[in-house]
């Protein structure tokens, strides 16, 4: 009980910054380094702390369990996740055709439009959409349309390698993750809670 009271007192002493002008940002997280999705999920966690509503749409992932699926459920009802992909395409062997992967990505684009126009969300994360564009599962014109039609106060985050130069140019904030060293290059398998 004493710890809880100290925590409440500490929080009451903290200042909460309020921008003079609120702007819905377009954020791109790209590069060949680890942590693009993790960074976006950190934004979802932070937004939840302000009681903001978050929608995450994963464009490619979907054939392998990741801890984020159930972790995000713990943030409900503020955060929802939609796993729309059929797994990684272009990496290894996929049991689905390019057309099937593209059909799923097109469903994800429609879902993103619906979520954007619903007025229910403060932050929408389109996870691996950069890869989806590079793999021709979505079209550049569709991504530009999302940016152009974004409600003024909605934050829109694009993750994945190979962000298109036009998307980078339209974004407010762009971060490129750089791969300096990775455990996998040392023969270490992906680890639960860290890599997936």
Image (cartoon, rainbow, N blue to C red):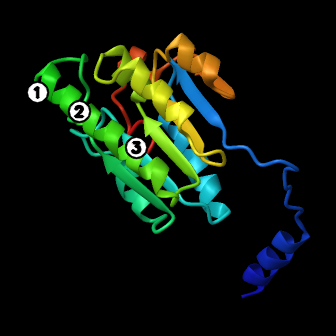
Q: Residue furthest bottom?
A: 1
* Local secondary structure at mark 2: loop
Mark 1 vs mark 2, CA separation in Å: 9 Å
Dot 3 or dot 2: first in sequence order is 2
Q: Nearer the viewer, mark 3 or mark 2?
A: 3
Residue 52: percent from left, percent from top: 61, 61
Q: Tag 1: Cα neighbours inside 10 Å, few (<14), some, or many (≥20)? A: few
Q: CA distance from mark 1 to mark 3?
A: 23 Å
The disc label shown at residue 112, or none: 3
Disc 2: which residue = 87
Q: Is residue 179 visible?
A: no
Q: Quadrant of the C terminus?
A: top left
Cβ atoms under marks 1 and 2 closer than 8 Å: yes
Element assignment for label 1: loop
Judge whether 2 appears above or below 187 on screen.
Answer: below
Viewer-nearest of discs 1 and 3: 3
Alpha carbon of mark 3 to alpha carbon of mark 2: how far?
19 Å
Mark 3 neighbour density, 10 Å: few (under 14) some (14–19) many (20 or more): many
Circle number at residue 96: 1
Name above or below for residue 75 compared with residue 123: below
> Which residue is drawn at the image coordinates 33% and 50% (left, top)?
82
Q: Residues within 10 Å of mark 2 (few under 14, many from 20)?
A: some
């Amino acid at each position: 009980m004493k710890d809880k009271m100290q925590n409440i007192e500490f929080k009451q002493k903290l200042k909460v910054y309020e921008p003079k002008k609120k702007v819905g940002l377009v954020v791109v997280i790209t590069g060949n380094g680890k942590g693009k999705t993790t960074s976006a999920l950190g934004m979802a966690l932070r937004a939840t702390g302000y009681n903001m509503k978050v929608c995450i749409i994963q464009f490619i992932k979907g054939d392998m369990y990741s801890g984020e699926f159930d972790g995000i459920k713990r943030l409900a009802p503020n955060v929802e996740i939609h796993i729309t992909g059929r797994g990684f395409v272009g990496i290894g062997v996929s049991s689905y055709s390019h057309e099937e992967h593209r059909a799923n990505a097109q469903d994800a684009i429609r879902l993103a439009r619906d979520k954007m126009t619903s007025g229910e969300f403060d932050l929408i994360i389109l996870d691996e959409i950069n890869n989806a564009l590079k793999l021709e599962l979505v079209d550049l014109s569709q991504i530009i349309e999302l940016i152009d039609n974004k409600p003024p106060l909605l934050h829109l985050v694009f993750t994945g390698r190979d962000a298109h130069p036009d998307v980078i140019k339209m974004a407010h904030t762009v971060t490129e993750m750089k791969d300096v060293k990775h455990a996998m290059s040392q023969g270490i398998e992906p680890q639960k809670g860290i890599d997936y």
